[in-house]
Amino acid sequence: MGKDIIADHARWPRLEDEIFKVNKECKEAIKEKGRDKVIDSTLGTLIDDDGNLIAFDSVYDTLKNMDKKSIASYAAIEGNEAYLDLLVDKCFGPYKPDAYIKAIATAGGTGAIRHSFWTFLNPGDYVICPNWYWPAYQTMCEEFDREFKTYEFLDKDFNFNLEEFKKTLDFALENRDRVLCVFNSPANNPTGFSIDDAMWDEILDVIKKRAAAGKFISILLDVAYIEFAGDGSQKKFFEKFSSLPENIITTVAYSMSKSYTAYGIRTGACIIISSNGDFANRAFDSMKHSNRSIWSNITHAGMNILVDIENDEEKKKSYEDELKANRQLLEKRAKAFVESAKEVDLIHLPYFGGFFISIPCDNPKEVAEKLKEKDMYIVSNKNGLRFAVCAVSEDKCKIAPKLIKEAIDEVNK
């Protein structure tokens, strides 16, 4: 008998999520000192100025009025057809790529990322992404025995670092036939950065040149924050994924968590884009198999919410009004932070939209600890600090840069 009942591939240390750990500490500080005295920049959810989670009335009124049989019943393994058709239209808007498109329901955007890593890579193949990234990418690579490699996200002028991307892509393909490139844009988590349309042309040119050698290159577009990244024109880049070489396949991870404030309902989709209809269908079949093996099917209520709202003009207007109002809320908070940061010479990465702004610094973990002494709770990563404009009031966004600058200077003096 072996010495460990846990199989070799399943042995991991206990997962201690740093974000939820800091959030717990923050809640204790608020309980002791009062909400007005504490800046809570921890969780990535929309919070109003009174510290309450924002849940769109249009979404949850729809859920409350839903027939209980529609909530309780199983959905199709791949997701209901009406849901998938409407979600594809909502995701792309008027900028749908000229390609074969298939979509499959997933457990949030996370499920779509999981399917992409699993479907298009073999064990030992590389997932490459910028060095400012959502940590779950790496966790999934560990789970599925995929290699994970990052590159410097931005150059000295704060533009997408095309040269570092090229180097990392070439490294990943040197001894392998497959690679998957993650692009969390627009409104990157944790920076708020968006890749502009001209840079997308250059990125795709690089990828097409590498694909000419017969390599299989997958592109994953994680667009979790896309509905908070602009008024619709931010979706124009999708057109660029038309008519790509058939050994380049693109997937879009679309999530209802942020765009519908439905974090816990766990509904999204993986949208497959390919110039080869057979490849798109086979990717869909693979993902449907994965759906059955992992979740059996996806939350029916989440799909029904999107369908009910999109098919009812009054509900749709209410939803769009709420989305716009909260996008403007984020814009005001971000503007307050950016203007105050400029006043105190605090360097931050360019913000174009979404839930977060990032501040590069040395010794970020120590800086985050120092900020606790100033009653500010913030998430650190390897490269700096993640400030959650989604969770901090406009008034506190004005105060925060000075505190952050002071903490950075005190730690790194």
Image: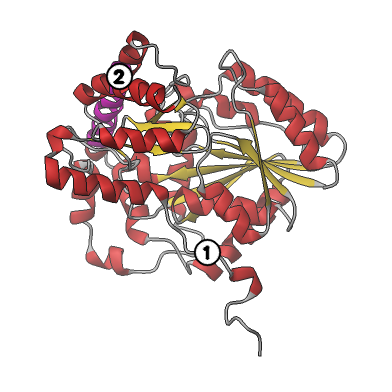
As helix, strand or loop, the secondary structure at mark 1 comes to: loop
On residue 402, which mark appears?
Answer: 2
Q: Where is residue 254 in the image (x, y as percent from the top left)?
A: 47, 43
The residue nearer to you, when weighing 238 against 316, is 238
User: Picture quarter containing residue 154?
Assistant: top right
- Residue stretch in magenta: 318-336
Q: Residue at x 62, y 37 (%)?
A: 129
Indicate left or right for 251 with 243 as reference.
left
Q: Residue at x 24, y 38 (%)?
A: 47
On residue 13, which mark appears?
Answer: 1
State the scheme by which the image is colored: secondary structure
Q: Which residue is drawn at 82% across and 47% down?
A: 177
Tell me which secondary structure the magenta stretch mostly adopts. Answer: helix
Q: Compared to 39, does 267 lie above or below? A: below
The residue nearer to you, when weighing 312 against 218, is 218
Residue furthest right in the image: 213
Indicate left or right for 123 with 75 as reference.
right
Looking at the rendered structure, the kind of residue marked 1 is: Pro
- Decide which of tag 1 and tag 2 comes sooner along the chain: 1
Q: Where is residue 341 in the image (x, y as percent from the top left)?
A: 35, 15
Looking at the rendered structure, the kind of residue marked 2 is: Lys
| Picture mark count | 2
Q: In which quarter of the image is the N terminus?
A: bottom right
Q: Does the magenta stretch include residue 332?
A: yes
The residue nearer to you, when weighing 76 against 313, is 76
Q: Compared to 245, does 204 lie above or below? A: above
The residue nearer to you, when weighing 200 against 171, is 171
The answer to whether one can see residue 197 in this image is yes
Indicate left or right for 170 with 32 as reference.
right
